[in-house]
Image (cartoon, grey):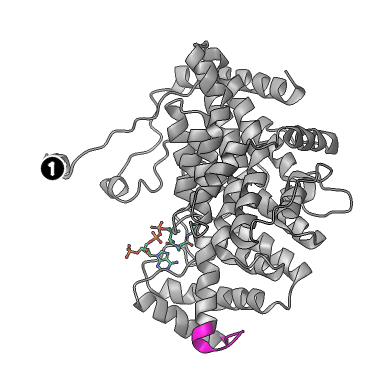
């Protein structure tokens, strides 16, 4: 086995022992009581999952293995001359809990480059879709097509010992991550660039090569991709894409099937699709007002109008966060450095000034602050990636890092099939009578 895989297994064994002892000693301890409102309202706040890779604090935002986003930007390895963190390093951190050095990040990068070849039948599946099909539909179908490569599914059908599951899941996770940029770039070039595809450049890092295959050679865009791939990677375990991947994986569906489930969830407008919706919302506002940069008063009126029409203001609100998302702040800092005068970026900042008090005044929106999706489109647009339908695919490529590292953990810890209890309203009526 390679160094990273050996280390991961050693960490898994250690954690397994600790968990066994915790369950033995404290297995009957109650974590919290669950209210009827929580049961009916999206299980909000119910602690029911263990996800080792990251933890979300409602005020502080996300920490990956204890590190905040500013800390990751400072401490994770970077390309020579670059200033944004490498997702290769973040994956290693999430998988092993240890901060990588440059050599380890290089090692992950070359492992992924070696495994990045996408079989032809996957492209054939993409080609079978009408070009008009949404990129997330094409992306999810391509991931399912890639499932023919699953080492876990093959080994399982041949009858392996359950102690070996983790090893095949690890191999599948590494191969799947390695291949996603090529698949995503293929969909992009097919849909928006007349099928004029660009071959990978094996000398580049995972995100740099992704940018290259998309057709963007600007070093600023490559830096944006590195940051983007890091900040979208993980958001603890209960969000739709992470939870769906974990849930489906708990049935021992292989990593390809599990990740495809996560991606169909990410494609929902209340989750990952919000990044496309934000830029559409801004563009529709600009069109309606016939202005490239609406004033704050005009933005405020438009927000009121959106709410009055019974629609959400995309990019605002969160099921857990109660402050400005640090992922929004990281992108804002990037924009201040690279494109402070861009009119769409300026509009995003103006919405940030205007929207929170209006949303708060509704009295029902629990978090009036921006989430990760509020900023990303304006940065992509600045570099010329203007096809907003594609934005959620970028989110999906990044999200693979966190949810697949977690899936490796699920199997190394031998977590069981997930099966929470559900009830009926008749049951509830009887229950409240008692
Ligand atoms: N605009 C308008 N109304 C909003 C709102 C927003 N941005 N955010 C919440 N609300 C509304 C909800 O729709 C809900 O209304 P009803 O009671 O009429 O159903 C009410 O406020 C209470 O909702 P909440 O408890 O504050 O929020 P939830 O935990 O139910 O939902 C989220 C969280 C993200 C789905 C919601 O804030 C939303 O729809 N935001 C806009 C879409 C978005 O940006 N999604 C991306 C989230 C990040 C990600 O996953 O990528």
Q: Nearer the viewer, residue 291 or 236?
A: 291
Identify the residue at horizontal 70%, vertical 37% (top origin): 116
In the rendered view, would you say 47 is above or below 163? below
Residue 61: image location, x then y, percent: 58, 53
Q: Quadrant of the C terminus?
A: top left
Residue found at x 48% / y 16%: 157
Q: Which element type, helix, strand or loop, lies under badge 1? A: helix
* Camera-side residue of 97 and 284: 284
Of 201 and 121, nearer the camera is 121
Magenta region, residue range:
287-295
Percent from the top left, x then y, of residue 34?
Answer: 32, 41
Q: With respect to residue 94, does 62 lie above or below?
A: below
262 is within the stretch colored magenta: no
Q: x, y (%) of residue 145?
A: 52, 37
Is 202 on the left-hand or right-hand side of 28?
A: right
Q: Relative to the observer, which residue lies in front, 128 or 30? A: 128
In this image, 262 relative to 3: left or right?
left
Q: Which residue is mark 1?
A: 426
Quadrant position of residue 250: top left
How packed mark 1 is, by other alpha carbons closer than 10 Å (few <14, some 14-19, many 20 or more), is few
Which residue is at 45% across, 47% downward? 264
């Amino acid at each position: 086995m390679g160094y990273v895989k050996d280390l991961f297994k050693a960490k898994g064994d250690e954690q397994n022992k600790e968990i066994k002892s915790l369950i033995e000693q404290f297995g009957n301890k109650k974590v919290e009581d669950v209210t009827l409102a929580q049961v009916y309202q999206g299980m909000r706040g119910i602690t029911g999952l263990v996800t080792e890779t990251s933890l979300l604090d409602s005020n502080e935002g996300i920490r990956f293995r204890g590190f905040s986003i500013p800390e990751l930007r400072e401490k994770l390895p970077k390309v020579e001359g670059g200033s944004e963190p490498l997702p290769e390093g973040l994956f290693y951190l999430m998988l092993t809990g240890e901060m990588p050095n440059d050599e380890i990040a290089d090692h992950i990068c070359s492992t992924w480059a070696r495994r990045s070849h996408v079989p032809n039948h996957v492209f054939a599946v993409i080609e079978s879709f009408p070009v008009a099909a949404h990129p997330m539909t094409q992306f999810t179908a391509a991931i399912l097509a890639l499932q023919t490569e699953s080492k876990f599914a093959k080994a399982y059908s041949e009858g392996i010992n359950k102690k070996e599951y983790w090893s095949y899941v690890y191999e599948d996770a590494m191969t799947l991550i390695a291949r996603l940029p090529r698949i995503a770039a293929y969909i992009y070039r097919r849909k928006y660039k007349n099928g004029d595809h660009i071959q990978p450049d094996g000398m580049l890092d995972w995100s740099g090569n992704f940018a290259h295959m998309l057709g963007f050679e600007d070093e600023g865009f490559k830096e944006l991709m590195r940051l983007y791939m890091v900040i979208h990677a993980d958001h603890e375990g209960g969000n739709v894409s992470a939870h769906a991947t974990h849930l489906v994986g708990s049935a021992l569906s292989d990593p390809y099937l599990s990740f495809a489930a996560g991606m169909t969830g990410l494609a929902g407008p209340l989750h990952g699709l919000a990044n496309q919706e934000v830029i559409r919302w801004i563009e529709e506002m600009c069109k309606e007002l016939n202005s490239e940069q609406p004033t704050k008063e005009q933005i405020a009126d438009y927000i009121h109008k959106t709410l009055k029409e019974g629609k959400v203001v995309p990019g605002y609100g969160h099921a857990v966060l109660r402050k400005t998302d640090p992922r929004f702040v990281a992108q804002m800092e990037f924009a201040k450095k690279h494109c402070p005068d861009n009119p769409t970026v300026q509009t995003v900042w103006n919405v940030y000034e205007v929207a929170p008090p209006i949303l708060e005044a509704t009295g029902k929106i629990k978090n009036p602050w921006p989430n990760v999706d509020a900023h990303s489109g304006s940065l992509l647009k600045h570099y010329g990636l203007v096809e907003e339908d594609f934005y959620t695919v970028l989110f999906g490529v990044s999200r693979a890092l966190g949810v697949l590292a977690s899936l490796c953990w699920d199997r190394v810890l031998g977590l069981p099939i997930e099966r929470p209890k559900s009830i009926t309203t008749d049951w509830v009526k009887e229950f409240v009578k008692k």
